[in-house]
C-alpha cells in the first residue's frame, strides 16, 4: 500500500497510539469476552436446571466460538466494502437482542443455538478491532498495539466471573444475559459516538461474490499467512481449553466455591496481562519474530509442567493455579506477535485478512476446547488438551515459518513500515 493512500485514512481524533485508542479498540473485543466469562461460574447451575450434561453445557461456550468463526468470514469482506463502522454497529445491536433471547431459553438446544448466533453477531466487533489496527499500523508497532489490546481484553477474565457470579447468586443465571444485553447497548452508544471511520471510500474494495472468493483463495495460498494465523488459534485453544474446563475442575474436583473460582480465574487473567505487557515493552527493540520463537517453546514446556502438576496433584489448587499462571503468561509472547506477522502481509484487504485470521483462530479453539468435556472434564483432560495445542503451535512455527532457520528472525513477513 502506498504512503499516499495510507495518508488518506482518517486519524482517530487524537486517540491514535494513545491509551484512548487502546481502550476504544479494546472495547470492541470486550463484548464477546464478557459474554463468555460472565457466564462461566453459572455452568454447573445451567446444567442442573436444564437437565443436561457437562459436555452439552460446555458447548454453550464453544458455540460462541463456532458462530464467531463463521461470522467473521462474512463481516471481514463486508467491512472492506462498506467501511468499519457499519458492521460493528449492526453486530453489537444484534448481540444485545440475542442476549435477551438467551435469558428466556428453556432447553439446552435453544441456548446452544442462541449462543452460536451470539457468536455470529459479535464477529463484527472482533473483525473491526483487528482491521482498524491494520488500517494504520504494521510490523512491530502493530504487535505492540495488539499487546496493549490484550490488557483491555484481560479485564474480562479479571472481573467478569466475579460480576457474573454475583448477579447469578442474587437473580439467577438468566440475569447474566440481561446484563450482557445492557452492556451491548452501552457499547453501541460508545461506538456510535467515538469510533471514526478508518477506511475512507477511496480505499474500499468493491467486490462481488467471485472477487470475494478470490480474495480468500489468495490468502489461503499464502502459506506463511496461514501458519502465522494458525499459531494464535492454537494459543486461543490453550486458553479456551482452560476456560471450558476450569468451572468443573476448580469447583467440582478441587471443591472451590463460586467466589473462590472467580478469584482463581482472575489470577489466570493477570498472567495474560503481564505477558502481553512485557511483549509490548520488548517488541520494538527485539522484534515480533524473535519473541515468538522464544515464547512458543517455553510456553510448551510450561504446559507440560502444568499437566504433571494436574496428574500428580502436587501443591493442590495452589500448585495448579501457579503452574497455569506461568504457562499463560508466556502466551503473551506468542499470540499478539503471530497475529501481527500474519496481518502485515495483506494490508490492502485488512478486513478479509482479519476475518480469515479470526476464523482460523476461533475455528481451531472451537473444535479443540470441547475435547476437555469429551475426555471427561478432569484436570488431566483440561491440561492435556492445553499441552497438545501448544505442542502443535510450536511445530507449526518450526516447520512452516522461517523462525528457526538461520537468521530467520530477521526476515520480514511484510512491509517494514510501522504506519501504512
Image (spheres, rainbow, N blue to C red):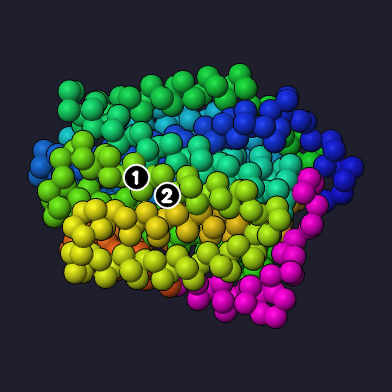
Could you tell me residue 151's position as x and y percent?
51, 40
Q: Is residue 31 magenta?
A: no
Residue at 20 percent of width and 64 percent of height: 314
Q: Is residue 60 above or below residue 199?
A: below
Q: Which is nearer the eye, 335 or 128?
A: 335
Q: Is residue 2 visible?
A: yes
Crowd band around label 2 with a 10 angstrom C-alpha radius: few (<14), some (14–19), many (20+): many
> At numbered mark 2, what does the secondary structure look like: helix, strand or loop?
helix
Q: Is residue 57 left or right of residue 236?
A: left
Q: Which residue is mark 2?
A: 271
Residue at 34 percent of width and 45 percent of height: 267
Res 221 quadrant in image: bottom right
Q: Which residue is mark 1?
A: 267
Could you tell me residue 230's position as x and y percent?
52, 64
Q: Is residue 393 magenta?
A: yes
Crowd band around label 1 with a 10 angstrom C-alpha radius: few (<14), some (14–19), many (20+): some
- As drawn, the label of residue 145 is none
Which region of the structure is painted magenta? 392-420
Q: Is residue 289 above or below residue 47?
A: below
Q: Are marks 2 and 1 in contact (CB under 8 Å)?
A: yes
Amino acid at each position: 500500500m502506498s504512503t499516499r493512500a495510507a495518508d488518506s485514512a482518517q486519524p482517530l481524533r487524537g486517540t491514535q497510539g494513545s491509551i484512548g485508542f487502546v481502550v476504544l479498540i479494546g472495547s470492541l473485543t470486550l463484548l464477546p469476552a464478557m459474554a463468555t466469562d460472565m457466564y462461566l461460574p453459572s455452568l454447573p447451575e445451567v446444567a442442573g436446571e436444564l437437565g443436561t450434561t457437562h459436555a452439552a453445557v460446555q458447548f454453550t461456550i464453544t458455540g460462541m466460538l463456532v458462530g464467531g468463526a463463521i461470522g467473521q468470514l462474512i463481516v471481514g469482506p463486508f467491512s472492506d466494502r462498506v467501511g468499519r463502522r457499519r458492521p460493528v454497529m449492526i453486530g453489537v445491536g444484534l448481540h444485545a437482542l440475542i442476549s435477551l433471547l438467551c435469558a428466556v431459553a428453556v432447553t439446552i438446544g435453544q441456548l446452544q443455538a442462541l449462543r452460536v448466533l451470539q457468536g455470529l453477531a459479535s464477529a463484527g466487533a472482533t473483525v473491526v478491532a483487528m482491521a482498524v489496527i491494520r488500517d494504520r499500523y504494521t510490523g512491530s508497532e502493530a504487535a505492540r498495539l495488539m499487546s496493549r489490546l490484550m490488557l483491555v481484553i484481560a479485564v474480562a477474565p479479571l472481573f467478569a466471573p466475579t460480576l457474573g457470579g454475583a448477579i447469578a447468586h442474587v437473580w439467577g443465571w438468566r440475569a447474566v444475559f440481561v446484563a450482557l444485553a445492557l452492556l451491548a447497548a452501552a457499547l453501541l452508544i460508545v461506538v456510535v459516538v467515538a469510533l471514526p471511520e478508518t477506511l475512507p471510500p477511496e480505499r474500499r474494495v468493491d467486490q462481488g461474490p467471485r472477487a470475494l472468493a478470490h480474495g480468500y483463495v489468495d490468502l489461503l495460498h499464502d502459506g506463511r499467512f496461514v501458519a502465522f494465523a494458525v499459531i494464535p488459534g492454537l494459543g486461543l485453544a490453550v486458553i479456551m481449553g482452560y476456560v471450558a474446563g476450569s468451572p468443573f475442575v476448580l469447583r467440582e474436583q478441587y471443591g472451590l466455591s463460586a467466589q473462590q473460582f472467580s478469584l482463581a480465574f482472575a489470577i489466570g487473567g493477570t498472567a495474560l496481562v503481564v505477558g502481553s505487557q512485557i511483549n509490548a515493552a520488548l517488541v520494538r527493540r527485539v522484534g515480533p519474530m524473535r519473541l515468538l520463537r522464544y515464547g512458543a517453546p517455553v510456553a510448551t514446556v510450561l504446559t507440560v509442567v502444568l499437566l504433571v502438576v494436574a496428574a500428580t496433584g502436587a501443591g493442590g489448587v495452589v500448585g495448579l493455579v501457579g503452574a497455569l499462571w506461568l504457562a499463560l503468561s508466556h502466551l503473551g509472547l506468542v499470540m499478539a506477535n503471530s497475529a501481527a506477522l500474519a496481518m502485515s502481509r495483506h494490508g490492502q484487504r485488512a478486513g478479509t485478512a482479519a476475518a480469515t485470521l479470526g476464523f482460523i483462530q476461533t475455528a481451531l479453539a472451537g473444535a479443540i476446547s470441547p475435547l476437555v468435556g469429551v475426555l471427561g472434564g478432569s484436570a488431566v483432560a483440561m491440561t492435556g488438551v492445553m499441552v497438545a495445542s501448544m505442542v502443535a503451535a510450536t511445530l507449526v512455527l518450526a516447520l512452516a515459518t522461517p523462525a528457526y532457520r538461520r537468521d530467520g528472525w530477521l526476515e520480514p513477513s511484510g512491509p517494514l513500515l510501522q504506519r501504512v
